[in-house]
Amino acid sequence: MEKEEKVINYYVLCNKLKNVIRTGWKDWSVQRERLESVAEHIFGVQMLAIAMKSEYNYDVDILKVIMMIAIHELWETVIWDLTEFQISREEKERIEHEAVHNILKDLIDGEEIENIFLEFDGHKTKEANFAYQCDKLECDLQCKLYDEEWCVDLNKQQSCNAIENERVQKLLKENKTWSEMWLQYDKEVIPYDENFKAIINYALDNTLRKIE
């Protein structure tokens, strides 16, 4: 296969992510004319990482972080978006790793790129841990933005798997809104550091959409 064909094949495959809508928003029946795609999520995480690095002076290689984020959803070009409530973590990881390997195997730098993906997935290096927190926080903030548009009716969630989760139920019963529930849920289950928790707390206490 010629280099030009490899470049085009990889680009066309990744281009699919512009049209893959994030599963979580569909599961929660978010009512909006246009919902966030996986590609838009990736962009949001990258912009959030840049801002977090800037304001909190993290000792990370930000270019490596941006690379990690760029490819962290690569598997969704093949098997689409899956949530933690649809499949076990172990099975999800196996499927993801196999898909990424197959996607990258024809690229000259494929092994190097795959190793960066695996580093992100391991959450053990400082760059991977930082990128992982950015990934989770971006979803929480997007959730709050949708809630500020009144896009979710908690009384119309008959087909939502997540709403059956015990912790989710507990938080909702505490009279929290949809986004407050998710912000608090992830604050409890994601190993956010103090800076990321500060952003969560700000989002809980403030309206985010101040500038249009």
Image: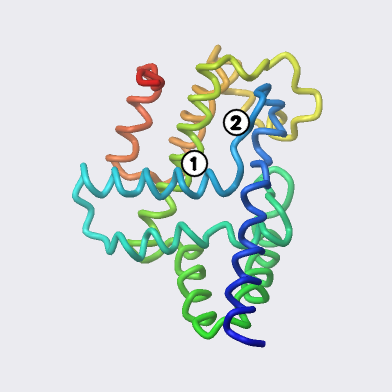
The amino acid sitting under disc 1 is Val
The one nearer the camera, 75 or 204, is 75
Residue at left 21%, top 59%? 59
Disc 2 to disc 1: CB gap under 8 Å: yes
| N-term-proximal mark, 2 vs 1 | 2
Residue 97, image quadrant: bottom right
Q: Mark 1 points at which residue?
A: 189
Residue at left 33%, top 40%? 196
The amino acid sitting under disc 2 is Arg
Q: In screen coordinates, is 207 left or right of 194?
A: right
Alpha-carbon distance for marks 2 and 1? 10 Å
| Secondary structure of the residue carrying numbered label 1 | helix
Q: Tell me: residue 42, above or below residue 187.
A: below
Whole-percent x, y for residue 142 in the image? 50, 32
- Quarter that holds the C terminus: top left
Q: Tell me: residue 39, above or below residue 59.
A: above
The numbered dot on residue 140 is none
Whole-percent x, y for residue 104 in the image? 60, 76
The one nearer the camera, 173 or 179, is 179
Whole-percent x, y for residue 188 in the image? 46, 36
Residue at left 35%, top 48%? 49
- Quarter that holds the N terminus: bottom right
Which colour style is shown?
Answer: rainbow
Q: Mark 2 points at which residue?
A: 167
Q: Tell me: residue 76, above or below residue 29.
A: below
